[in-house]
Image (cartoon, helix red, strand yellow):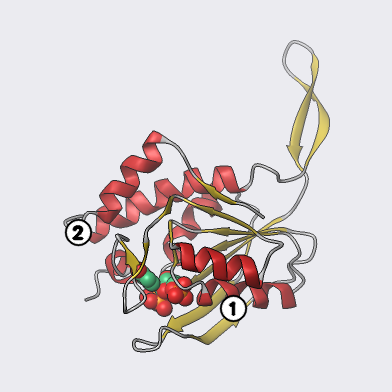
Amino acid sequence: MPLQVLDHPLAAHLLAHLRDKSTNPEQFRSMTETLTTLLVLQATYNIRTREVMVETPLKTTPGKVLDQPLAAVPVLRAGLGMLQSVVRLFPDVAVGYIGLERHEDTAIARSYYSKLPNLAGRYNLCLDPMLATGGSAAQAISLMKTHGATQITMVSVVAAPEGVAFLQNAHPDIQIITAALDDGLNAKKYILPGLGDFGDRLYGTP
Ligand code: PRP
Ligand code: URA
């Protein structure tokens, strides 16, 4: 499926501040939440609805309500910074967790935790702000599929072309939405220009 890059002045504004190395963790967390809200509104554009009749104080009128359960799966740690926005928008969301950590030298992700509900029939969001090599996202989505997920959207903040290509090749059936498609990866597999280590900037760790 094609990649969608969010195009909105507020998203661009927030992204510029997230990239700025002088942005402190408190500001970083707050702007991540707002940017995720914008991303998730776009990412859930195709969630199923059904028609209902609503009685206003004046007359009866047709309306639409959500008709598909949603699940959000943040990839620890950095994906946790995106979760609160989804929970605020969709209070009935089911939440699963996947813990993955890239090896410092090889950049290969190792799984250290997973707790997922049954994802069959749900509109599923995988939350991970950085799509670098795509290895973490591909593993997370494989795991979601083993728990029944068939409709999956990857929600990221910054993506590298290498990671997008890897993920599209591994999982051609998923949708990817991001706030930025950057230039590429450096020798240590960090995104350029990127914003550094998202987890460290979110949690104030060196
Ligand atoms: C970061 C990020 C992604 C992953 C992306 O996590 O949050 O999960 O790297 O890189 P990839 O596309 O090359 O796999 P990291 O492993 O640094 O763990 P953290 O979130 O706990 O800091
Ligand atoms: N993980 C991050 O947090 N940042 C990158 O640039 C790449 C992987």
Q: Quadrant of the C terminus?
A: bottom left
**Left/right of residue 69 with respect to residue 5 in the rendered view:** right
Name the disc covering residue 139, or none. Answer: 1
Q: Position of residue 61 (x, y in %)?
A: 79, 18
Please rate how many residues cluster around mark 1, counting C-alpha atoms within 10 Å: few if below 14, some from 14 to 19, many from 20: some
Instruction: Assign ligand 2 to one image quadrant.
Output: bottom left
The image shows residue 44, relative to residue 142, as above or below, that is above
Disc 1 marks which amino acid? Gln
Chain-order first, disc 2 or disc 1: 2
Q: Which residue is mark 2?
A: 21
Residue behind label 1 places its C-beta within 8 angstroms of ligand 1: yes
Question: What is the x, y in percent for residue 171?
Answer: 67, 68
Q: Amino acid at mark 2?
A: Lys
Q: Residue at x 46, y 39 (%)?
A: 7
Q: Is residue 76 visible?
A: no
Q: Can the viewer see residue 199?
A: yes
